[in-house]
Image (cartoon, grey):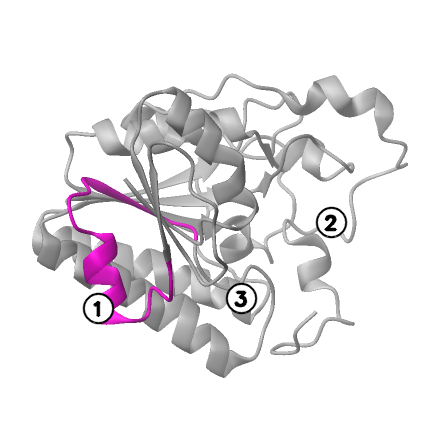
Amino acid sequence: MLITGAAGKAGTGVRPLLRARGHELVLLDLTPIDAQPGERAITGSFTDEATLSDALNGVDAVVHFGGYSREHLWSNLLDINISGTNAVLDAARRAGVRHVLLASSTHAVGYHPIPSIPVHDLPPRPDSLYGVAKVAMEALGAVYADRYDMTVVSARIGTVEDRPRNLRSLSTWLSYSDLVRLIEATTALDLPGSHTVWAISANTRRWFDISNGQGIDYYPEDDAEFAAAEIFEPGAPGNGLIGAEFADPEHELGVPW
């Protein structure tokens, strides 16, 4: 299994869990990684064709975490998050890798108001240029799945971290254990096509319907509620939008923060 952006928060969080479950990992990142037994680390960019070809040698699935994780200059989002995703998908196709998980985001729908009941699906309504890049990522996943009979899961990730840390994350949290469950559901899925799922845990206060993922056999087990007593924030989270601070006026489009 190849993980791009493996030195980031999500990659770092899932690596030991995947290793413990017997997965052999290829780790690709611009930041050097100290590989553990069962891992092969490659320092380089997923936008480089030769580096990608090396990284894909012998793997059976791709988990694409790489790219900017916040609002950034449009030129950078275009080069890395959009063109880079296309490069990863095309290299996977050429290498015969049929299963790809793309790290999309709830910021692809971040300008929708927070739903009053868990919602099964939402059309794109990005809250930022970063969110626009995630919409493009999902579209790229769909066209590669349809054209080349690949299985591509676009995971609309909420808040992936070791534990919930604010009121919003009580609804959007994704545990590392549940992210591993989603990765394994993707790699085991014998259903070519494009599949967009809410990548959240089974949170009591969830905004999104977790049955959305059952079509690919993703069944989250963790719940952010264990941390609720530690969080002291009154009222509703943020500005009432799914994207929260990403949609705030003080964060201008295309300005890194």
Q: Residues within 10 Å of mark 2 (few under 14, many from 20)?
A: some
In the rendered image, the quadrant that contains the C terminus is bottom right
Front label number (1 vs 2): 1
Residue 239 falls left or right of residue 79? right
| Range shown magenta | 43-65
- Residue shown at 37% from the left, 69% from the top: 82
Residue 87 falls left or right of residue 7? left
Please determine whether, in this image, residue 157 is positioned above or below residue 177.
below
Gap between marks 1 and 3, in whole Å? 27 Å
Task: Please give the residue where the numbered disc 1 appears in the rendered image.
Answer: 50
Can residue 166 be seen from the camera position used here? yes
Q: Which mark is residue 79?
A: none
Q: Quadrant of residue 139?
A: bottom left
Task: Please give the residue where the numbered disc 2 appears in the rendered image.
Answer: 240
Q: Give the mark nearest the N terminus, 2 or 3.
A: 3
**Circle 3 SS class:** helix
